[in-house]
Amino acid sequence: MTEGAGMQHTLAAPVTATGVGLHLGQITHVTVLPAATNVGRHFVRTDAGAELIPADVSAVSQTRLSTQLGSPEGPYVRTVEHLLAALWAAGVDNARIEIDGSEVPLMDGSSLDWSRLVQSVGTVEQESPRGGGILSEPVIVRDGDAYVMALPASELRFSYGIDFPMSAIGNQWHSWSPMAGDFVELVAPARTFAMAHQIDGLRSQGLIKGGSLENALVCDEEGWLNPPLRFANEPARHKLLDLVGDLSLLGVLPTMHVTAYRASHSLHVQLARHLAAICLSETSAPA
């Protein structure tokens, strides 16, 4: 995974996928291709010219229920977090992601299909080293009792807590370290989830048009409408997946322990922006 020192990597061959987007409900086709060193991960809207949309925190333009990159007026690409999490976890530093619409396919609601596609072709080492940031002080962003914070640590770790009034979800936590567990096995399969009573309201606002019981877990007061779950704490693991995807917009992550509680894409991205500013200033400071 794209953490710390080492050499850059890209895909060994292109991979392709087709599916429906969660919010817009449109079918899009995606091809992820190898890319040269030092170009990072970036999207190209093949239906809207050849303009590059960098998978970088500076390009985030919207964070309501998903993360969107690019200009609000377009071209933009939304719901990028699951694909980007899979690429980051596989150690893919450089990739060209061609897409013929404005939303990345949801697939089964998790990162598993993306991770398996990357595994099917593998990665290749490139000739340029990765950069590396330094986190020397705690960083926290909050909104009421929701927060996400990063602490200096000896290894990279993510911890996520959620708390919902639905008894089927309740209070859940999950913690994952890339050094101690396989992303594809422990995080990637966790699917997005929704509350049944919120669905009509969200759809009336032009959201989750592509959501279904095939690509999202749905819960009501009685329990899950489409069991079984893949993990007892699958919702917490999915939020951790989202966090990884959003923080991957930093490129190389500093060694740190990131803890989130009842957070959101907005808070994830706010933390990423703070970390980008801190790590840039510290690595560019004179010795």
Image: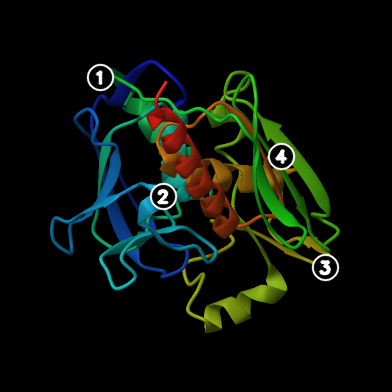
Left or right: where does residue 57 sit relative to residue 76? right
- Whether residues under marks 1 and 2 lie with C-beta atoms below 8 angstroms apart, the answer is no
Residue 117 at least partly seen: yes
Q: Secondary structure at mark 1?
A: strand
Q: CA distance from mark 2 to mark 4?
A: 30 Å
- Circle 3 packing at 10 Å, graded few (<14), some (14-19), many (20+), is few
**Most extreme residue toward the front, as rendered?**
286
Quick check: 149 above or below 255? below
Q: Which one is closest to the eye, mark 2 or mark 4?
A: 2
Q: Nearer the viewer, residue 48 or 223?
A: 48
Q: Position of residue 257 (x, y in %)?
A: 65, 31
Q: Amino acid under label 4? A: Phe
Find disc 1 in the rendering and name its residue: 128
* Among the two numbered marks 3 and 4 on one chain, the one whose residue lies closer to the N terminus: 3
Left or right: where does residue 96 sit relative to residue 153? left
Find disc 4 in the rendering and name its residue: 231
Left or right: where does residue 222 sit relative to residue 1? right
Where is residue 94, by image quadrant? top left
Q: CA distance from mark 3 to mark 4?
A: 20 Å
Q: CA distance from mark 2 to mark 3?
A: 37 Å
Find disc 3 in the rendering and name its residue: 221
Quadrant placement of the C terminus: top left
* Among the two numbered marks 1 and 4 on one chain, the one whose residue lies closer to the N terminus: 1
Q: Nearer the viewer, residue 203 or 5?
A: 5
